[in-house]
Image (tube, rainbow, N blue to C red):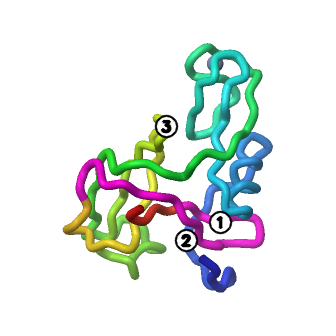
Amino acid sequence: MATDVSAYTKPLPPITKLNAPFWEGTKKGELRLQTCNECGHQWYPPSTHCPNCLSRDYAWKAVSGRGKVWSWVVFHQRYFKAFEDELPYNVTLVELDEGVMMMSTLRGIDDKDVHCDLQVKVEFEDATDEQSVPYFVPA
Ligand SMILES: [Zn+2]
């Protein structure tokens, strides 16, 4: 979803050598995960080793961007000033079809209608010229 990138005021994680391929993917509308070349395991957030077999031999691969709600909470209280205008908002743990958990938010649905196993798909909000932030919508 195209937005005015200069209007994005929420905090963003710094781009590092480790996570740069993830952010390059988001700018292309791809959700990418590290995939172990030794055992095939996929994981998030980025790390230097496969958490399954400790190999450092991995590649970044685009995944389906589809999954289901595993759990969620709704924030009614301001914990972060940058998110104040969105109160109340949900923080949702999505289990991707690849089995990887990703913390995100769910849009396009009333918080009261969110439920476990709700099928969702990823979309992206342009934040800066280098980063688009993934979020999920009902599939
Ligand atoms: Zn591995």
Q: Which of marks 1 and 2 is nearer the N terminus?
A: 2
Q: Do the residues labelled 1 and 3 touch (CB within 8 Å)?
A: no
Q: Which of marks 2 and 3 is nearer the N terminus?
A: 2
**In this rendering, which labeled residue sits more in front, label 1 or label 3?**
3
Q: What x and y, as percent, mark residue 13?
A: 63, 56
Name the kind of residue labelled 3 in the image.
Answer: Val
Q: What element carries label 1?
A: strand
The magenta segment is: 115-134
Furthest-right residue in this view = 17
Q: Disc 3 designates what residue?
A: 100
- Cα distance in 3D space between marks 1 and 3: 20 Å
State the quadrant of the C terminus: bottom left
Q: Residue at x 45, y 40 (%)?
A: 101
Q: Disc 2 designates what residue?
A: 10
Q: What x and y, as percent, mark residue 126?
A: 65, 73
**In this rendering, which labeled residue sits more in front, label 1 or label 2?**
1
Q: Decide: is 28 above or below 19.
A: below
How many marks can you see? 3
Q: Decide: is 56 above or below 86.
A: above
Q: Residue at x 56, y 61 (%)?
A: 134
Number of residues whose C-alpha sits closer than 10 Å to that of mark 2, classed few (under 14), some (14–19) or many (20 or more):
few
Q: Is residue 101 magenta?
A: no
Q: Disc 1 designates what residue?
A: 132
Q: In this rendered view, identify the residue nearer to me: 30 or 74.
A: 30
Number of residues whose C-alpha sits closer than 10 Å to that of mark 1, classed few (under 14), some (14–19) or many (20 or more):
many
